[in-house]
Amino acid sequence: MRHVLKLKPKFFECIKKGSKIIELRLLDEKRQKIKLGDEIEFLKEPELKENVITKVSGLLIYPSFEDILSDYPISYFSDDNTTKEDLLESLNTFYSKEQQEKFGVVGIRIKLT
């Protein structure tokens, strides 16, 4: 199965060059459909004209973004110029603490195809 997800340019470029190997999302109904071996097509915002295809190689289920960020190096999620605190703040603007408590979060391990 192929899923389509949008990404901010900074994170899109990290996936494109192969340095970002875990994509973080809320484990809501949409992301619960993602399974090992599925493909994810990432579209670069805002134009959504550039894409990159990846394969799901792992699913890491956590109660919150803070928990998963404490278990892995920041380089798995972003570039070296981003701190864990900055990334956490950004994630919390997309997904509230209440949403994280309700659904949990998922780290989607990806590989370029």
Image (tube, helix red, strand yellow):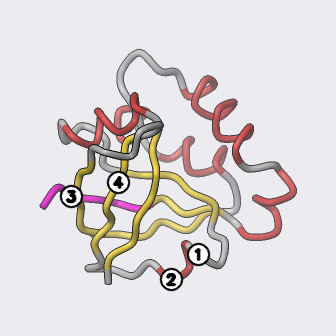
Q: Which amino acid is tagged 1?
A: Lys
Which residue has dot 2 on it?
A: 33
Label located before the other in sequence (4 or 2): 2
Q: Which amino acid is tagged 2?
A: Lys
Q: At which x and y percent is residue 107?
A: 48, 59
Q: Residues within 10 Å of mark 1 (few under 14, many from 20)?
A: few
Label located before the other in sequence (4 or 3): 4
Q: Secondary structure at mark 2?
A: helix
Asked if labels 1 and 3 touch by Cβ distance under 8 angstroms, the answer is: no
Q: CA distance from mark 4 to mark 1?
A: 15 Å
Q: CA distance from mark 4 to mark 2?
A: 16 Å
| Residue ranking furthest to the left | 113
Asked if labels 1 and 4 touch by Cβ distance under 8 angstroms, the answer is: no
- Label disc, if present, on residue 95 of the rendered structure: none
Q: CA distance from mark 3 to mark 1?
A: 20 Å
Which residue has dot 4 on it?
A: 42
Label located before the other in sequence (2 or 3): 2
Residue 69 sits in quarter: top right
Highlighted range, magenta: 108-113
Task: Choose mark 4 or mark 2, whichever is in front.
Answer: 4
Q: At which x and y percent is residue 89?
A: 69, 30
Q: Secondary structure at mark 3?
A: strand
Task: Choose mark 3 or mark 1, whichever is in front.
Answer: 1
Q: CA distance from mark 4 to mark 3?
A: 12 Å
Q: Residue at x 29, y 33 (%)?
A: 13
Q: Residues within 10 Å of mark 2 (few under 14, many from 20)?
A: few
Asked if labels 2 and 1 touch by Cβ distance under 8 angstroms, the answer is: yes
- Label disc, if present, on residue 30 of the rendered structure: 1
Task: Choose mark 2 or mark 3, whichever is in front.
Answer: 2
Q: State the residue in front, 80 or 49.
A: 49
Which residue has dot 3 on it?
A: 111
